[in-house]
Image: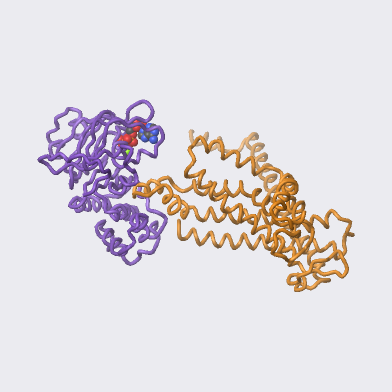
Amino acid sequence: MNTLTKSEAPISSTQQPRPVLEVVEVTIRYGEKPAINKVSLSIPQHRITAIIGPSGCGKSTLLRAFNRMNDFIPNVKMEGQILYMGSDIYVREVDPVEVRRRIGMVFQKPNPFPKSIFQNVAWGPSINGFTRNLEARVEQSLRRAALWEEVNDRLHESALALSGGQQQRLCIARALAMEPDVILMDEPCSALDPVSTARIEDLMFELKERYTIVIVTHNMQQAARVSNLTAFLENGSLVEFGETDQVFTRPRNKRTEEYVTGRFG
Amino acid sequence: MPQASTAKSLQAGASTRKYRTREELIRFVLFLCAFLSVLTTLSIIAILAWEAYSFFREVGVFDFLAGTRWTPLLEPRSFGVLPLVAGTLQIVVGASLIAIPVGLASAIYLAEFASSQVRRVLKPVLEILAGIPTVVYGYFALTFVTPLIAGIFPSTQIFNAASASIVVGIMVLPMTASLCDDALRAVPESLRQGAFALGATQFEVTLRVVLPAALSGVMASFVLAASRAIGETMAVTLAAGATPRMTLDPLQSIQTMTAYIVQVSLGDTPVGTVEYQTIFAVAALLFTITLGMNIIAQRVLARFREVYE
Ligand SMILES: Nc1ncnc2c1ncn2[C@@H]1O[C@H](COP(=O)(O)OP(=O)(O)OP(=O)(O)O)[C@@H](O)[C@H]1O
Ligand SMILES: [Mg+2]
């Protein structure tokens, strides 16, 4: 696994799967008030980590920090470090474009390009110069996103003709085609019906064999069903972070308990 | 008793009736305005058609459309309109060569690269530039652009197509840029975010997602720019000259369809003569070309829309 800079920090060996992303004392502000306040946590490889918390607590802000999507929002200031494979992705030498090639993202609302299904999936690889075996790569990505069977006979039709759930799986396939290490998902099912949601949850189970997944969700059941670890944020602070089982059944913090049992507010 | 009182309140009182009459009146006035504007347009087309018809009783349609000599006011008279069409085309092509690439590039800069502060200043400036009276451009061409060209190419005539093309290009540039900018900004932010998240650079996002998604709007602005250049009158009358001529040399004097219409309208050609009716024939042709362009453009746009929306 190559890293982003030459000045490579030694990867600390832990007992658990090694951390792919480490958040160290991160504070993020839009203007003055911190949206994320001194948060530290580490995301292990080939696991699904869920980030939960009430609306406005900073989940999306934290998630976007992982692949430097906050760079596009004016007046965002960040303190602290985010390490990917041990190296800080916010130092000057790191190209944010390179970070985003390794750490893909799926958004809340499906946002396929107004192009054909094939072109959508091929888009990432082709701008990055992978033009050989593009067909094979597109097929593989669509298969991994559990969409191939539904679209293989109409690859060259517009992606916008797909249903919402299919579009979201197409966006997942589009992210997979880049062969990223990490996939960030910001409420990927919130615009979908229960059947599509179930399909995407099944898909996440399969994907974690190869990828590290971080998912933001408002849906407690979803977090409990799909994730291995759960982080609970409130008002920009990390209240609790641990194995999902433990967070949901034996939460250490009173606030966490109130939130996961729905007695929140 | 509640039912009875409800029924009563629903009956129209005197004041309600007055209010209804006023509504009707307003509706009628508005209808009249709409009707008048349609009627005006239709009567202009009718007059154009009638006068053109009178013209074509004297001059053959084929002689008019395919003739390469336009000397309706001089003996021996000849009514071949192609030199005027060629002159117009030269201006349109020349102006488009400037307005389309520069306008698109400015729009891309404005929509995708400029900070919001820069944008806040530049966008209104574009709109102000679009409002400069066209006669100003004509003088600008004569007094500034032509001497500049003549400095480089000594064979340049005082009135020439190049100078007029350049100022017409500059004239339609703000409109082109502003319309392209609108089209680019209409592309949802979520598409840009999606592309950035795939490790695309700003350039890749612009050229390979935003621009294709905005293509129909961008093409529409190009067509509008071209049709404004076709209809442009003042600058070409002042700067391009009054010499109907089939030439590819942009340094020579030419005449456009619009400039010819101005020339005859301002001259002392007697009303009702064939010479006078030429302007209606030329105007009818101008109208047909513009109409045809708009129809073609709409077809093209409809096709793009099918693919992209
Ligand atoms: N672009 C922005 N400019 C200014 N403030 C912002 C911006 N985006 C988010 N914020 C603020 O930062 C805080 C955290 O927002 P964030 O979107 O991360 O919350 P969230 O937990 O994802 O909420 P939700 O569950 O509603 O999506 C909120 O108080 C929000 O108002
Ligand atoms: Mg959010």
Number of callouts in the render? 0
Rendered purple, the chain in question is A
Percent of width and height locating residue B254: 75, 60
Percent of width and height locating residue A231: 21, 36
Residue occupying the far left of the picture: A15
Q: Residue, x 32% and y 32% (percent of image)?
A: A78
**Quadrant of residue A163 within the rendered picture:** bottom left
Looking at the picture, tell me which residue is in the foreground, A95 or B181.
Answer: A95
Drawn side of residue A224 relative to residue B180, left or right: left
**Quadrant of residue B277 within the rendered picture:** bottom right
- Which quadrant holds the C terminus of chain B? bottom left
Residue occupying the far top of the picture: A32
Percent of width and height locating residue A250: 12, 34
**Quadrant of residue A244 within the rendered picture:** top left
Looking at the picture, tell me which residue is in the foreground, A170 or A67.
Answer: A67
**In the rendered image of this protein, does residue A95 appear above or below residue B47?**
above
Looking at the picture, tell me which residue is in the foreground, B64 or A103.
Answer: A103
What shade does chain B have?
Answer: orange
Percent of width and height locating residue B209: 43, 53
The image quadrant in which ligand 2 is located? top left
Q: Residue, x 64% and y 59% (percent of image)?
A: B93
Drawn side of residue B304 relative to residue A196, left or right: right
Q: Residue, x 21% and y 39% (percent of image)?
A: A9
Display colour scheme: by chain
Looking at the picture, tell me which residue is in the foreground, B91 or A27.
Answer: B91
**In the rendered image of this protein, does residue A31 appear above or below residue B185?**
above
Drawn side of residue B128 relative to residue A248, left or right: right
